[in-house]
Amino acid sequence: MNRLQRVRENLRRAYDTGRESVRVARIERPPDPEPEEDVEFTPPAPEPAVVHGSTSSLDDVDVPHSLRIAAAWSWRLIVVGLIGYVGLRFIGMVSVVVVPLAIALLLTALLGPAVGWLLKLRLPRSLATFLVLICGLGAVAGTLTLVVNQFIDGLPQLTEKASAGVRQIQDWARTGPLHLSDHQVDQAIDSAQNWVNDNTSSLTSTGISTAATVFELLTGLLLVLFSTFFFLRDGRKIWRFIVRLFPVNARWSLADAGDASWTTLGAYVRATVLVAFIDAVGIGLALLILDVQFPFPLAALVFLGAFVPIVGASVSGAVAVLVALVGQGWVVALITLGAVILVQQLEGHVLQPLIMGRAVAIHPLAVIIGIACGVVLAGIIGALVAVPLIAVLNTGIRRLSRRRPEIPPDAVVVTAGGQR
């Protein structure tokens, strides 16, 4: 056997050996089980994607963290703004009802302590509320009657003095430091008359529209009276009914915030009335001593103006100075101005901090912005309601943001009688 035959024999032997080993392995291995027909194939769960802690998808990983925070704040502010806009539009649509209710709430906060005092005398709640409301209406009607009578009695004399004052101003414009000519003075007077003539139509239309809505005003007045009566008599029951409409977990916080806000509103209204009364008495005495016309009507104007903080006192004081200038001359007007400034400084630095206290302390910037927004949205009523609304919201939001202390699960509650 040559070498080639040996190689061929070795290859054949190796091939046969490999085939024999494969055959033996197939015989020894058990057959694969057939899959059941009813069992569905479940693919293996994919491995969780590794993302940033503040993201929920891989797409957010490429967005900067500051931009994600800004976007989150933006859409939330947009939602809050839309809700606020819809709320303001709704209030504007039903302002005929909202404004009397707001006035009724202020009157309720003012007259509530008087009703509570009568209840301590064992009077029925309905009778106590009726007596307080009638006494309040009598005081308002008497004050208005006195103011109107004094104004009617002194109006002719004031008109004559106003005409004389205008002539004095004309003479001063000609002979004073301005050295205006007669033509320039006449031109200024003509311009003022033209402005009055141009705005006469708007003033007349306002008067006509006001006359046309007398029924609406009477309806609002009746709504104020009825709402004040029922708020004074059943205010606590109404508030409890409103609280029960909310989920159980939110009732405690809402009730606490409502009670604190109502306390703030009552303190604000009573303190404002006291401060306004002191301002009116101070400026009224100064006007009476200086023999300025209409001391009582001007004092009543100062009292009403004090309900609009900062702005109202300045406007009513300016009216008093102007009346003193027309009626008594510039010397008395300067003295009146000094008296008004003195009373306002006493109010701002002594009365407000002492009477208002920390319960309704609001920054002056918030007061100015609130009054401006109230005037734009609802005119004079908005200016009157803006500051108490800010005070109530300030207290309510602070109470709602305060977390209620959690009770440990293993705590033992002990009643007043010592029982667990």
Image: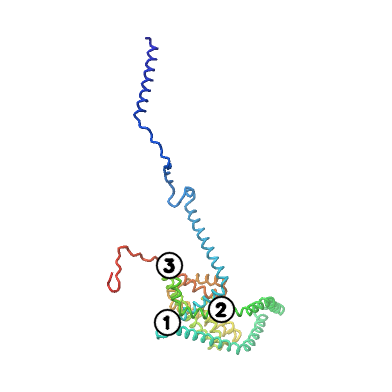
Residue 129 point in image, percent of width and height:
46, 83
What residue appears at the point 42 percent right and 42 percent down from the top-left corner? 38
Residue type at tag 3: Leu
Name the element at disc 1: helix
Residue 230 visible from this viewpoint: yes
| Disc 1 versus disc 3: nearer the observer | 1
What residue appears at the point 45 percent right and 51 percent down from the top-left corner? 56
229 displayed left or right of 148:
left
Camera-nearest residue between 107 and 165: 107
Camera-nearest residue between 37 and 208: 37
What residue appears at the point 65 percent right and 86 percent down from the top-left corner? 164
Task: Check the image and report above or below for 71 versus 24.
Answer: below
Residue 39 point in image, percent of width and height:
41, 42
Residue 84 point in image, percent of width and height:
53, 65
Residue carrying label 1: 116
Residue type at tag 2: Gly
Q: Residues within 10 Å of mark 3 (few under 14, many from 20)?
A: some
